[in-house]
Image (tube, rainbow, N blue to C red):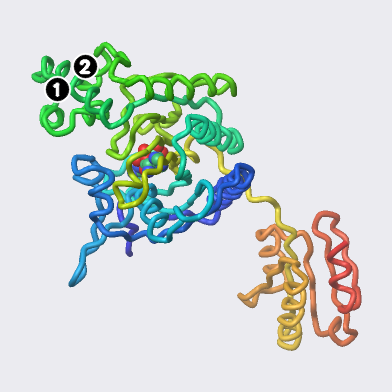
């Protein structure tokens, strides 16, 4: 028997209503904030990600799913931001008036070692807003993320924020960090000793216990921020306070992707174990230009849907459908029954029938299992009179009515 590929998941019918609830709720909230959906392909040119996420990013170095054919190598998208900025520019959305406020829902792929909350195919619900560098936009985006969590019924999460500053500030941060970490280099893991040389900010994302301990002991300060970036960060914090959004400033939160600058944030949940980020995001003020576009700022975030469901910790029960179950007894009745089912569906009445040629008793059991609230019984006797028997399962009552009155009867 074939098995699913490691790190992928079948979303079975009993789980799917939880997914649908999350997706429907998200779409409703996005429209309240005036975001529009964008759908981009799941395959992209590899260089799009190498260029934007950074050659030293873990995703680029170790986690890309590559598809080789005779001529090209493509990547299954590991995240949405780069693809959306690519699409924004390719489709000239920058020439349209106003901000592009976009949302997306879909699968992402990373070649990671699978564990709880860490899959190779997972799903993002995210947003990207392109065209403004204003601090109040950062506040809208963070408050939107929080509003989504509240609407999903998730509590107990923590919002963590930081500012990386502009490109110059990021360099100053890297230099300062390099200096501090070089002194502790012998206590760091071999990967982090390399990271000090290549991209020291990556040390801060290391999951190794010893490295984490050293990072926590470093004395954080914001002296690398230039006055403009410090002003931006202060404004973001003040306005978040204004909206009563509770957040924690985490000075060593840098995020593992190169495109970020200024505000970065992460939302964690204590029920998730070691993979505790349910969502994350930040600003990318140089990304649009780097991909050949104008000098426009952008900001966004993405939630991992599988992690949202772990944090939600309960499956949404599928609401009881008003299902009608038809039991046709005999060949003539079965043929007439198919027509009746078509008429009910055209009238938007959900219905089903027995396709296993069961006895009346067996078919009644199947109707029960399908949680039908009405059962229709059509035998030769009823058919001769152009009648049908309607059984109300909750009241345990039954009556015979003309077939032509059936839709009216079922609708009341
Ligand atoms: P990210 O932090 O790489 O950011 O991913 C966002 C979220 O996706 C994580 O917080 C986590 O919940 C979920 N996630 C990531 N990897 C996995 C995995 N292997 N299995 C299950 N869930 C996972 C980004 O991707 C950025 N593009 C976010 C962003 C949007 N920044 C600006 N705009």
* Residue 276, position as x, y percentages in the image: 39, 31
Q: Is residue 386 above or below residue 195?
A: below
CA separation in Å, label 1 and label 2 = 8 Å
Q: Quadrant of residue 90?
A: bottom left
Which residue corresponds to the image point at 48% horizontal and 33% vertical from the top-left? 134
* Residue 295, position as x, y percentages in the image: 37, 44
Image side of residue 130 versus residue 292, left or right: right
Q: Nearer the viewer, residue 203 or 4?
A: 203
Q: Nearer the viewer, residue 1 or 157?
A: 157
Using the image, tell me which numbered label, if any, was put on residue 214: 2
Residue 116 visible, this angle: no
Residue 243 visible, this angle: yes
Instruction: Tell me the crowding category of disc 2: few under 14, some 14 to 19, or many 20 or more residues within 10 angstroms, Cα based.
Output: some
Among numbered discs 1 and 2, the one appearing first in the sequence: 1
Image side of residue 40 versus residue 55, left or right: right
Q: Nearer the viewer, residue 165 or 82?
A: 165
Q: Quadrant of residue 378?
A: bottom right
- Dot 1 and dot 2 residues touching (CB under 8 Å): yes
Q: Quadrant of the N terminus?
A: bottom left
* Residue 289, position as x, y percentages in the image: 32, 46
Q: Is residue 287 above or below residue 371?
A: above
């Amino acid at each position: 028997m074939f098995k699913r590929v490691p790190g992928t998941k079948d979303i079975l019918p009993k789980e799917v209503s939880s997914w649908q609830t999350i997706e429907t709720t998200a779409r409703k909230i996005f429209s309240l904030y005036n975001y529009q959906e964008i759908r981009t392909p799941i395959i992209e040119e590899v260089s799009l990600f190498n260029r934007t996420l950074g050659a030293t990013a873990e995703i680029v170095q170790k986690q890309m799913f590559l598809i080789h054919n005779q001529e090209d190598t493509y990547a299954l998208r590991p995240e949405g931001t780069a693809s959306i900025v690519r699409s924004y520019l390719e489709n000239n959305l920058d020439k349209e008036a106003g901000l592009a406020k976009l949302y997306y829902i879909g699968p992402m792929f990373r070649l990671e070692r699978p564990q709880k909350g860490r899959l190779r195919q997972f799903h993002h619900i995210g947003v990207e807003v392109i065209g403004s560098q204003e601090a109040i936009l950062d506040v809208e985006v963070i408050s939107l993320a929080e509003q989504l969590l509240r609407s999903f019924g998730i509590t107990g999460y923590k919002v963590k924020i930081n500012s990386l500053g502009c490109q110059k500030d990021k360099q100053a941060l890297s230099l300062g960090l390099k200096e501090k970490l070089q002194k502790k280099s012998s206590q760091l893991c071999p990967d982090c000793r390399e990271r000090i040389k290549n991209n020291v900010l990556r040390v801060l994302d290391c999951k190794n216990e010893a490295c984490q301990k050293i990072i926590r002991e470093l004395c954080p300060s914001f002296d690398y921020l230039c006055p403009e970036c410090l002003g931006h960060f202060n404004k973001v914090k003040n306005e978040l306070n204004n909206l009563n959004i509770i957040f924690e400033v985490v000075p060593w939160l840098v995020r593992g992707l190169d495109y970020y600058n200024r505000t970065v944030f992460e939302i964690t949940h204590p029920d998730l174990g070691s993979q505790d980020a349910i969502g994350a995001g930040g600003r990318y003020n140089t990304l649009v230009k780097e991909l050949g576009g104008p000098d426009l700022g952008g900001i966004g975030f993405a939630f991992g849907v599988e992690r949202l469901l772990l944090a939600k910790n309960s499956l949404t029960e599928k609401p009881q459908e008003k299902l009608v179950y038809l039991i046709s007894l005999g060949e003539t009745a079965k043929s007439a029954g198919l027509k009746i089912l078509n008429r009910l569906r055209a009238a938007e009445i959900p219905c089903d029938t027995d396709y296993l040629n069961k006895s009346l008793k067996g078919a009644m059991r199947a109707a029960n299992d399908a949680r039908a609230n009405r059962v229709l019984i059509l035998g030769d006797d009823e058919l001769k009179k152009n009648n049908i028997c309607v059984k109300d399962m909750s009241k345990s009552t039954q009556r015979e009515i003309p077939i032509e009155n059936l839709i009216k009867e079922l609708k009341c």
